Image (cartoon, rainbow, N blue to C red):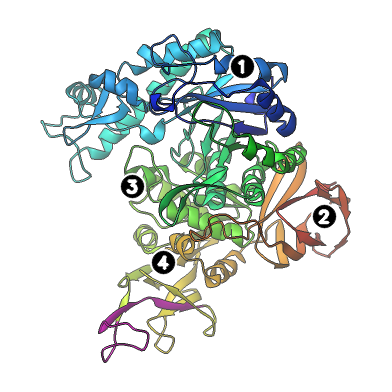
């Protein structure tokens, strides 16, 4: 069986079993499992084992098995996957276990309001020793499965306010709470208390992972979303691989963002999971399978930056697979597998980077680990990808390792701020010749204070305009109306924005804004010389505004700013939006070209069978030693011509979803 680091394509099945589902294994057939293995050729399969309700869908001996079984479903899955040489992993809910909590109320997290959480177990409690470790050993020993994908972990970890936890915090940190619990960010030691629980979560991970590895060292363990954009910090426990499942309502942008956050964790195998369906229509819960083209585009966003990909199709309530849905995934399987030689575990070549601050996110997150505030970074990721930037995401731990290797660094709008050390490192980067781009009024204010090289003047979120009469011709009855500002690069083409700040600086004005196109403009974006380098300021949160209401003027502004450095690949022209990732695999440069078009972010477009191709692509590539270019996976040679500056020019008539240029030297 392939280990996870060797695996590129997988299938995930789960259904979070509970007693109302009835008899388990009644319609599970060996021939269906064989059909899945033969038709879709996965490197691994993950199946339901224990979901958030806390009941196992196999006849466990640990007391939490479903009441009735027709057979042992897990034995059948293991039998067939072993014969087909396909690794078998379990979907297992960790911290989140409703059944265990109901039977052990003292093990529930005690919330700040005095109520116990219905399903979140205490991080310093007995859950891991009582149930989780014995159950994982049962799976590894009795069933000989290959590993586990532990769900409901970091994103369900909560701060506990029980007396013992409060006492332990004071004892370990030396902080005296003086009888007042740190329940809100207005309370003393609120952030210290949350950081303490992040330490408890990592201890919990280390405890169960190390205990299982001690007896079953080849059993591979992943904690879903650990050390990802949910938990943006360096890997500090002995996980075997990293993984997460994408937002089903905006999966393509979620994939671009989450993939780059995981790709920074060098040396670790990682993958991302798409949901095969949308689970919401017009605000109502639903189940609508996606078209295969949507899934291929989501897969491309992951594999183009070195990750592996898995697709999630829920099992039926008795544990059997949805064969009618799986039969339609042959095209997706072929698409992914034929790209493995050019993508799997490739690494991005340093060019531009976007900061995902651990410090800032942890202070904004509503839970210990969550995506609170993700819009700023996800939106900036989408924007930079849409203009063809070969982009990485870095946190403080990776930024410090490689900051001077990046040609351009972007800092999105910050919620809380950065540590002083990080601010100084970024300013030093610019002073030494780097191109630093700061977005958003809060970010600009923080760096204005630290550098003294510029200033900013905050404006109202909207401005008010008086409408005389009872209505304005569009059936608006109000007498006053809140209106967004206008911004422009050239005084002819305009976009809209809100919550800006005026940049007070001497330098090159990139963009300006005003209440109306006819009123005097204020500076919105300015490039300021700073030492040997430059700082470019953008006086509004362009990231989240792009994610919620993308405008072509957002792209025009960022294209202009990005001209400050010479990328390895430049899009000379293209009809459509083309995402580029410049990677290196086995010593060979692979230029990943992903179609960024489609209605993936449109809440009113649930599923879509058509993604417009990118046409008439003309690229300029810095590759002075290139002997030939091959378009993969087609294996088609690409003609090119050389220019005097060491670049080469080539053209591709059409990119449907994802193509790769292999640069042969």
Please say whether residue 105 is one of the residues in the magenta stretch.
no
Q: Position of residue 487 (x, y in %)?
A: 46, 77
Q: Nearer the viewer, residue 630 or 403?
A: 630
The residue that disc 3 covers is 364
Q: Label 2 neighbourhood size at 10 Å, few (<14), some (14-19), many (20+)?
A: some
The image shows a total of numbered marks equal to 4
Q: Residue 493's quadrant in the figure?
A: bottom right
Q: Are marks 2 and 1 in contact (CB under 8 Å)?
A: no
Circle 1 — which element? Answer: helix
Task: Determine the CA span between mark 3 and mark 4.
Answer: 19 Å
Looking at the image, which residue is at 27% across and 91% down? 468
Q: Position of residue 238 (x, y in %)?
A: 50, 22
Give the residues in magenta.
465-488
Q: Are marks 3 and 2 in contact (CB under 8 Å)?
A: no
Task: Determine the CA span between mark 3 and mark 1.
Answer: 46 Å
Q: Label 3 neighbourhood size at 10 Å, few (<14), some (14-19), many (20+)?
A: many
Q: Nearer the viewer, residue 261 or 468?
A: 468
Nearest to the eye among marks 3 and 1: give it.
1
The residue that disc 4 covers is 540
Q: Label 1 neighbourhood size at 10 Å, few (<14), some (14-19), many (20+)?
A: some
């Amino acid at each position: 069986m392939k280990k996870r680091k060797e695996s590129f394509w997988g299938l995930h099945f789960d259904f979070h079993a509970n007693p109302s589902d009835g008899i388990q294994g009644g319609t599970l057939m060996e021939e269906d499992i064989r059909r899945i293995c033969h038709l879709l050729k996965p490197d691994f399969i993950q199946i339901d084992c224990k979901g958030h309700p806390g009941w196992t869908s196999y006849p466990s001996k640990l007391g939490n098995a479903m009441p009735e079984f027709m057979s042992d479903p897990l034995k059948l899955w293991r039998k067939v996957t072993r014969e087909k040489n396909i690794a078998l992993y379990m979907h297992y809910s960790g911290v989140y276990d409703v059944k265990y909590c109901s039977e052990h109320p003292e093990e529930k997290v005690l919330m700040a309001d005095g109520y116990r959480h219905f399903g979140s177990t205490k991080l310093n409690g007995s859950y891991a020793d009582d149930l989780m470790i014995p159950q994982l050993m049962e799976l590894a020993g009795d069933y000989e499965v290959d590993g586990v994908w532990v769900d409901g972990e970091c994103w369900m970890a909560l701060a506990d306010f029980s007396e013992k936890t409060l006492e332990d915090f004071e004892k370990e940190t030396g902080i005296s709470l003086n009888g007042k619990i740190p329940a809100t960010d207005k309370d003393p030691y609120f952030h210290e208390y949350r950081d303490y629980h992040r330490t408890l979560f990592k201890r919990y991970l280390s405890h169960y992972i190390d205990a299982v590895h001690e007896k079953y060292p080849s059993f591979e363990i992943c904690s879903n979303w650990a050390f990802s954009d949910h938990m943006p910090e360096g890997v500090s426990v002995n996980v075997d691989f990293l993984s997460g499942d994408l937002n089903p309502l905006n999966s393509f942008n979620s994939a671009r963002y989450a993939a780059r956050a995981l790709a920074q964790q060098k040396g670790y195998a990682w993958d991302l999971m798409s949901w095969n369906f949308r689970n919401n229509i017009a605000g109502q819960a639903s189940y609508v399978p996606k078209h295969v083209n949507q899934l291929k585009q989501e897969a491309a966003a992951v594999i183009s930056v070195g990750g592996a990909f898995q697709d999630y199709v829920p099992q039926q309530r008795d544990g059997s697979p949805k064969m009618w849905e799986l039969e339609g995934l042959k095209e997706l399987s072929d698409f992914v597998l034929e790209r493995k030689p050019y993508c799997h575990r490739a690494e991005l070549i340093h060019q531009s980077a976007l900061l995902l601050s651990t410090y800032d996110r942890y202070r904004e997150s509503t839970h210990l680990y969550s995506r609170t505030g993700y819009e700023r970074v996800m939106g900036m990721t989408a924007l930079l990808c849409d203009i063809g930037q070969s982009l990485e995401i870095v946190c403080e731990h990776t930024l410090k390792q490689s900051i001077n290797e990046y040609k351009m660094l972007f800092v999105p709008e910050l919620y809380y701020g950065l540590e002083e050390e990080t601010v100084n490192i970024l300013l030093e980067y610019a002073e030494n010749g780097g191109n630093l781009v700061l977005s958003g009024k809060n970010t600009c204010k923080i760096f204005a204070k630290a550098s003294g090289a510029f200033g900013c003047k905050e404006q109202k979120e909207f401005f008010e305009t008086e409408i005389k009469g009872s209505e304005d011709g569009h059936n608006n009855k109000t007498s006053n109306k809140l209106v967004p500002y206008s911004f422009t690069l050239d005084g002819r083409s305009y976009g809209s924005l809100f919550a800006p700040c005026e940049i007070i600086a001497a330098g090159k004005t990139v963009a300006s804004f005003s209440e109306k196109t006819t009123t005097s403009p204020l500076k919105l974006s300015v490039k300021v010389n700073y030492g040997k380098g430059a700082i470019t300021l953008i006086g509004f949160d362009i990231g989240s505004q792009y994610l919620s209401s993308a405008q072509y003027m957002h792209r025009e502004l960022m294209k202009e700013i990005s001209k400050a450095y010479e990328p390895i690949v430049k899009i000379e022209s293209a009809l459509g939006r083309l995402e580029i990732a410049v990677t290196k695999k086995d010593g060979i440069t692979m230029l990943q070209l992903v179609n960024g078009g489609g209605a993936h972010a449109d809440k009113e477009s649930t599923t879509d069978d058509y993604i417009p191709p990118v046409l008439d692509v003309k690229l300029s590539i810095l590759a002075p030693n290139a002997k030939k270019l091959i378009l993969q996976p087609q294996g088609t040679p690409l003609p090119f011509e050389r220019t005097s500056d060491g670049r080469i020019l080539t053209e591709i008539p059409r990119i449907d979803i994802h193509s790769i240029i292999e640069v042969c030297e």
